[in-house]
Amino acid sequence: MTTDLEAAFAEHRRFLWSLCYRMTGSAADADDVVQDTFVRAMQHPPRRVDDPLRPWLVKVALNLARDLLRKRRRREYVGPWLPSPIETADEAPPSHEPVVAGELTTEGRFDLLESVSFAFLLALEKLTPTQRAVLLLRDVFDYSVKETAAALDRSEANVKTTHHRARAAMDAYHQTRIAPTPSRRTAAGQALQQFLERLAAHDVAGIEALLAADVRATTDGGGEFRSALRTIVGRDKVMRFFLSIVAFTRDSHVRFARFNAGPGVVVDLRTMPKERLAPRTVMTMNLNADGRIANIYVVSATRKLTAVDSV
């Protein structure tokens, strides 16, 4: 029985991680939830061994993830909270992800790549844990109402109501929603490279040309490293913030990559940082409809970087 469970769990591990990452917005938390799900399967296996294992595993994982979210919301977090970055392929779902059969871009639904974007994951933070689970199952993983109800131990009527409320809570996201198409990802990558080059050259006019007037820069040091304790809003303030820190990153190794459906860069300081500066930072960004940088996300909290490959 143990061998059978281990083999079955290995088969479903990638799907569970995919779901739990979107539920928690954290690669480390997704790892923990998936591991705890495996422990539960070993200690208290399902009674009906002939039934498919995935629905049972999904139910256990979602219960654990919802509990984790409730506990997280009761804890104070130092500064803005950002998802943890995961590296994603250029024109395919994230490397961690399984390919889910069925339509991926129908109206009101989100494909695998968009559903790991920072914008989407941050929008999910406005939902309750159960709303989050329902929206992901229905609109990302294409579960039916019946399947969703079974996964969450809810009635079908309750799932429909919760789904409606979850979609309503995502209205603000939909108003500025821009799908991460290959052409937009290319344009965003070029903008990121130009932004870094102009920062290094202290090209003020060039930086201003890249930034939207209402650009927002959010930094997440988790209270561990020095970072802005509030989101910085506005072209001038964002530009001055990055110009003030660029000198600290001159002696560093820089690697470009794609994170969460957008362009990104990993900055590793070569010398021991001072003044609570993070030894490793990941920065990613997105563009607005006019092609200007709308959001810049900077993550340096150690626990948030567990899915980022070392140099």
Image (cartoon, rainbow, N blue to C red):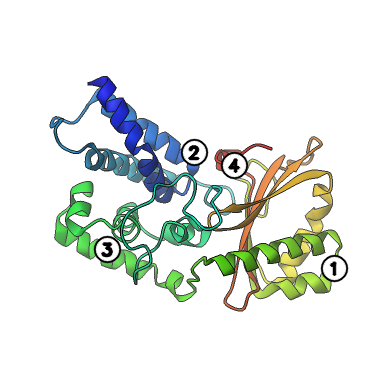
Q: Which residue is mark 2?
A: 28
Residue 59: x, y in percent?
25, 42
Return the disc, 1 or 4, that comes first in the chain's sequence.
Answer: 1
Residue found 53% across the figure and 54% down from its top: 260
Return the disc, 1 or 2, that comes first in the chain's sequence.
Answer: 2
* In contact (CB < 8 Å): disc 1 and disc 2: no
Q: What's the CA distance linking mark 2 and mark 3?
A: 27 Å
Return the disc, 4 or 2, that comes first in the chain's sequence.
Answer: 2
Return the disc, 3 or 1, that comes first in the chain's sequence.
Answer: 3
Q: Which residue is mark 4?
A: 308
Specify few, some or many for label 2: CA neighbours under 10 Å numbering under 14, 14-19, or 20 or more: some
The residue sitting at the top extreme is: 2
Residue 308 is drawn in which quadrant? top right
Give, as a three-letter code, the residue at label 4: Val
Give, as a three-letter code, the residue at label 3: His
Q: Which residue is mark 3?
A: 163
Give, as a three-letter code, the residue at label 2: Ala
Residue 79: x, y in percent?
59, 52
Say which quadrant the C terminus sits in: top right
* In contact (CB < 8 Å): disc 4 and disc 3: no
Specify few, some or many for label 3: CA neighbours under 10 Å numbering under 14, 14-19, or 20 or more: many
Residue found 32% across the figure and 53% down from its top: 133
Q: What's the CA distance linking mark 4 and mark 3?
A: 33 Å
Q: Secondary structure at mark 4?
A: loop
Give, as a three-letter code, the residue at label 1: Asp
Q: Nearer the viewer, mark 4 or mark 2?
A: 4
Q: Secondary structure at mark 1?
A: loop
Q: Nearer the viewer, residue 80 or 182?
A: 182
Q: Secondary structure at mark 2?
A: helix
Above/below status of 157 relative to 64: below
Q: Which residue is mark 1?
A: 203
Above/below status of 294 relative to 153: below
